[in-house]
Amino acid sequence: MKKKINLIVEDAYKNIRVDVFINKKENKISRTRIKNLILDKKLRLNNQINIDPSKKVSYGDTLELIIPEPKIASLKPYKYKLDIIYEDEDLIVINKPAGIVMHPGAGNFDKTIVNALINYDKNSLSNIGDELRPGIVHRIDKNTSGLIVVAKNNETHENLSIQFSKHSITRVYQLLIWGKIKPSKGKIETFITRSSKNRQMMEVSRTKGKKAITNYKTIEIFENEYTPTLSLLECKLETGRTHQIRVHMSSIGNSIVGDDKYKKKFKKIKNINVTLEKKLINLKRQFLHAKTIGFIHPKKNKEMIFNSILPQELEIILKMLRNASK
């Protein structure tokens, strides 16, 4: 059902962005959704429609925001076995394998996590976002595995979106990188923006883009005459930008093993174990796994933390590296 919100700017709120003002007054609606509604011309500011979300409001301004009736997705179900870690009436936590994309897009409209969710239960997904992304609150890349949380209703979707925007969600990743990282633990803090050379890639920037913060620590180093120098890391995200960990690791010269976009050339080792060499060269995914996700349950109001183990294809590589080090 369509909803209309009418607001008048009080003196205490003058000179702040219009999307921030609405978010402060209507804090159950995420700022991202408010921004998208404004860009979709659902806001009238002093009866004007073409409003930039960054426009500053003035004392006495009148606002009318229309929240349209959610669109019904017309997506094909995809018969695919989901690895469901947890489910209740509000949300689902899924352990996503590498090789499947999160939602329909250019070149793939049928074989995605969203299509699999529709096959699983098409009537239990939030529908306040993009009609091609019912239930999807956040994403991980096609060739990354690990935990994602999916919203089954709109209230849960809004609540989780706000937690993501406030960076209060716990997200921990495991990854294998080329070389050693110095210092062995620390924080990478940059801006990340779309690459000027390749629009499908991201890059770090000193001046533009969105702030991205990755905390990392070295778990294990593999360094001997039979293997290339590799390090197993754990990264805890403070922000969740597109390709964040991949871009950050590449920017400091320690790209992730198997990353075809932000890759480093494989160095030949004279006495390398041939089977290990093949495993590293032929890995059809990046060695990146979303190990932990934690959040406050929108309805139960209690912290929930979920963990998953490395997929077998990654665990095999670690086992071979450990055996080579003995």
Image (spheres, rainbow, N blue to C red):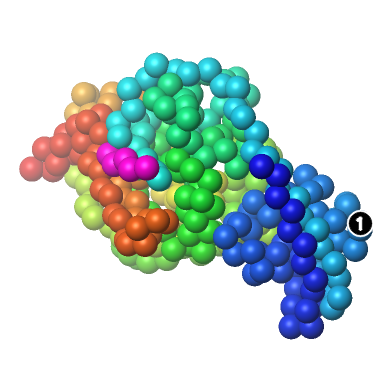
Identify the residue at horizontal 64%, vertical 51% (top origin): 33
Side of 60 relative to 165 (left or right): right
Q: Say if residue 98 shows up in the picture.
A: yes
Q: Nearer the viewer, residue 326 or 141?
A: 141
Q: Nearer the viewer, residue 165 or 282?
A: 165
In this rendering, the answer to whether 48 lies above or below 289 is below
Q: Is residue 86 magenta?
A: yes
Query: Which range of residues does the magenta coloring cover?
Result: 85-89
Identify the residue at horizontal 33%, vertical 43% (top origin): 88
In this rendering, the answer to whether 117 lies above or below 35 is above
* Crowding at mark 1 (Cα within 10 Å: few <14, some 14-19, many 20+): few
Q: Position of residue 34 (x, y in %)?
A: 68, 55
Q: Residue furthest bottom?
A: 12
Q: Residue at label 1?
A: 48
Q: What secondary structure do most residues of the magenta stretch adopt?
A: strand
Q: Nearer the viewer, residue 177 or 224?
A: 177
Amino acid tagged 1: Gln
* Quadrant for the N terminus in the image: top right
* Quadrant for the C terminus in the image: top left
